[in-house]
Amino acid sequence: MSDETFLSAFLSHVGGHPRTMKTRAARVRWGMTPPQFSGPLHELVANAHGNHARVVELLDTHPDLLEARFADWDETPMEAAAHTGSRAIAEELERRGATPTVPALAMLGRAGTLRALLADRPELAQVSGAHGISLLFHAALSGDPETLQTVWDAGARVGLDHALHGAINARSPEALAWLLEQGAGVTATDWQGKTPEQAARERGLDDLAGIIAARA
């Protein structure tokens, strides 16, 4: 994957991220300029946001970095895969022995596992993923209303409006409709300043945009 293709994919994955990447300095921080990595961990975490092939190559060479945290971003490979909806990467990390975080379980749509975990430890419904991204956003990335209902029943409420962007990233009308039924507002903007409807239309997801427009 070329740098340009990877950066484009990265940007599309993080379309729902509300606070970062609004300035050139932030874009440099998050790897939005042509990558100049400080080391293999930096490169691994950056690529865990969407470049599966490179993640495999890096882990084959540096297996000790599987669950390492890149301090500059306060982020692990699993956390990076989770908040970008990079299911294949999260599953690759899990296959190699990494433990999925609660947000990663939500992104993966593991409703049964989450239900049992949250029944035993309901406080985990309040956890967030990397960069403070909400559990509801991660659940929306699964595209699965059952997963959303599971974390909601356990008390997850933070990030309801922003989670619409997660449903759009998942291209899931079912998740989108579920969020709207819970009262999600339709004006929360992504890092580009786009509302959920605008983001959906830009991606050619007119069916999702129509669902939002009908509730506006």
Image (cartoon, grey):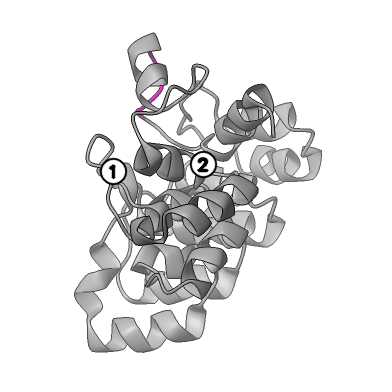
Front residue (pair 93, 8): 93
Residue at 40% over, 28% down = 37
Q: Check disc 2 and report the residue beneath it.
A: 47
Amino acid at the residue labelled 1: Phe
Residue 55 higher or lower than 94, as above or below: above
Q: Is residue 206 left or right of residue 132?
A: right
Front residue (pair 68, 131): 68
Residue at 72% over, 45% down = 208
* SS of the residue under disc 1: loop
Q: Which residues are magenta?
A: 19-23
Q: Is residue 183 visible?
A: no
Q: Is residue 52 left or right of residue 81?
A: right
* SS of the residue under disc 2: helix
Q: Is residue 174 visible?
A: yes
**Residue 211 % position (x, y):** 70, 46
**Where, quadrant-wise, is the C terminus in this rendering?**
top right
Q: Residues within 10 Å of mark 2 (few under 14, many from 20)?
A: many
Which dot marks residue 193? none
Front residue (pair 82, 134): 82
**Which comes before the other along the chain, label 2 or label 1?**
2
Amino acid at the residue labelled 2: Asn
Residue at 54% over, 42% down = 165
Q: Check disc 1 and report the residue beneath it.
A: 70
